[in-house]
Image: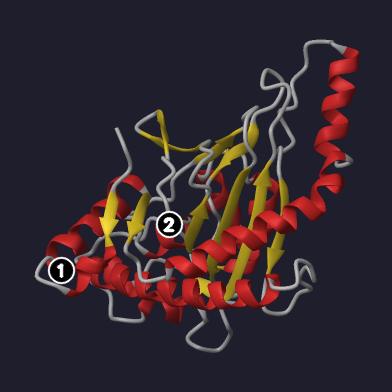
């Protein structure tokens, strides 16, 4: 079983209806799918790979002294049979329009700004396709994420590396979770695997595919669609070979945006299956319950 792969270039041709249906299937049945021929230049993606890998090389010494490495060293020395279950084996930093970015390598900022602009446009195009497939008015999801245009959505890019781990018997990798926000666009390593998503009780590999963009839907898309597009559980397994690169961009609601099932998702007397809440309140719950079952988060935010 493999997650769906969608040729995005066919959206503008004779196969548009079939392509829209493949995207709908990816959203409804999987919560994950891969886009190829998505329009982001391969030359830019090659530069992104290069600057992010170079950036990690400059940070590598820092990871060696990080909390996960220190805790693993301690577990190995103590040898008491415990595992490192509550820590992620990951080097990570986040890029946003208004935070501090790495100054090295010198072309990192220029390259990543160019990439973020391309990936933001792709995210907005994907949200319009979801609008159409869900029977929403065009722009419905984007409007909801910006609080009816009052507040800018949050757009962040998480640059992660998962270095080789010497003790796979003691370390998980990145713990299983769903994503809190809206639409996630991942440019993953095309050599080193490890990303898995949960479908029908089975963990499925998200196979590396050169220059593809992996799309997955977060908890807020689940709410807006009234459960039609479920956010999927996913994890990253640690490996003892290769340094896995992962560049995930998140198009999320403003913290001040009010999220609830869209009117079009509750027509024909279909009941709203999710509460109405501020995304900021949801995030307060999520940070405490990220690795726990999803449904109690909605119960908790309903009570705020």
Quarter of image, res 150: bottom right
The reply to whether the C-beta atoms of the residues labelled 1 and 2 are less than 8 Å apart is no
**Element carrying mark 2:** loop
Residue 304 seen in the current view: no
Residue 244 seen in the current view: yes
Location of mark 2 (residue): 211
> Where residue 143 sits: x, y (%)?
44, 81
Residue at 67 percent across and 79 percent down: it is 97
Q: Quadrant of the N terminus?
A: top left
Query: In this picture, is 225 found above or below 199?
Result: below
> Where residue 37 sits: x, y (%)?
32, 64
- Between 209 and 289, which is closer to the camera in this rendering? 209
- Between 300 and 172, which is closer to the camera in this rendering? 172
Left or right of 66, for residue 184: left
Decide which of tag 1 and tag 2 comes sooner along the chain.
1
**Other residues around mark 1 within 10 Å, as few (<14) / some (14–19) / many (≥20):** some
Q: For the residues marked 1 and 2, what is the alpha-carbon distance in whole angstroms?
A: 22 Å
Q: Quadrant of the C terminus?
A: bottom right
Residue at 63 percent across and 53 percent down: it is 286
Location of mark 1 (residue): 16
> Where residue 205 sits: x, y (%)?
42, 35
């Amino acid at each position: 079983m493999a997650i769906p792969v969608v040729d995005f270039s066919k959206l503008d041709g004779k196969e548009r209806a079939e392509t829209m249906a493949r995207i709908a299937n990816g959203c409804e049945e999987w919560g994950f799918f891969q886009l190829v021929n998505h329009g982001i230049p391969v030359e830019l993606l090659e530069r992104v790979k290069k600057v992010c890998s170079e950036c990690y090389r400059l940070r590598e010494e820092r990871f060696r002294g990080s909390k996960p490495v220190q805790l693993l060293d301690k577990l190995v020395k103590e040898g008491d049979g415990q595992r490192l279950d509550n820590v992620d084996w990951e080097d990570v930093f986040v890029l946003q329009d208004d935070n501090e970015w790495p100054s090295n390598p010198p072309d990192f900022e220029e390259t990543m700004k160019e990439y973020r602009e391309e990936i933001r446009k792709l995210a907005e195009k994907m949200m319009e396709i979801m609008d159409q497939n869900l029977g929403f008015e065009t722009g419905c999801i984007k409007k909801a994420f910006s609080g009816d245009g009052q507040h800018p959505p949050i757009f962040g890019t998480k640059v992660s590396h998962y270095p080789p781990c010497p003790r796979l018997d003691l370390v998980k990798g990145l713990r299983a979770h769903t994503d809190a926000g809206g639409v996630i666009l991942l440019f993953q390593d095309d050599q080193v695997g490890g990303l898995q998503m949960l479908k029908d009780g089975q963990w499925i590999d998200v196979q590396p595919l050169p220059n593809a963009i992996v799309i997955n839907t977060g908890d807020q898309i689940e709410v807006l669609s009234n459960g039609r597009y479920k956010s999927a559980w996913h994890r990253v397994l640690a490996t003892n070979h290769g340094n896995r690169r992962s560049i995930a961009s998140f198009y999320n609601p403003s913290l001040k945006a009010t999220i609830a099932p869209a009117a079009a998702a509750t027509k024909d007397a279909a009941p709203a299956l999710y509460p109405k809440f501020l995304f900021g309140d949801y995030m307060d719950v999520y940070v405490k319950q990220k690795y726990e079952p999803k449904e109690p988060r909605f119960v908790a935010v309903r009570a705020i």
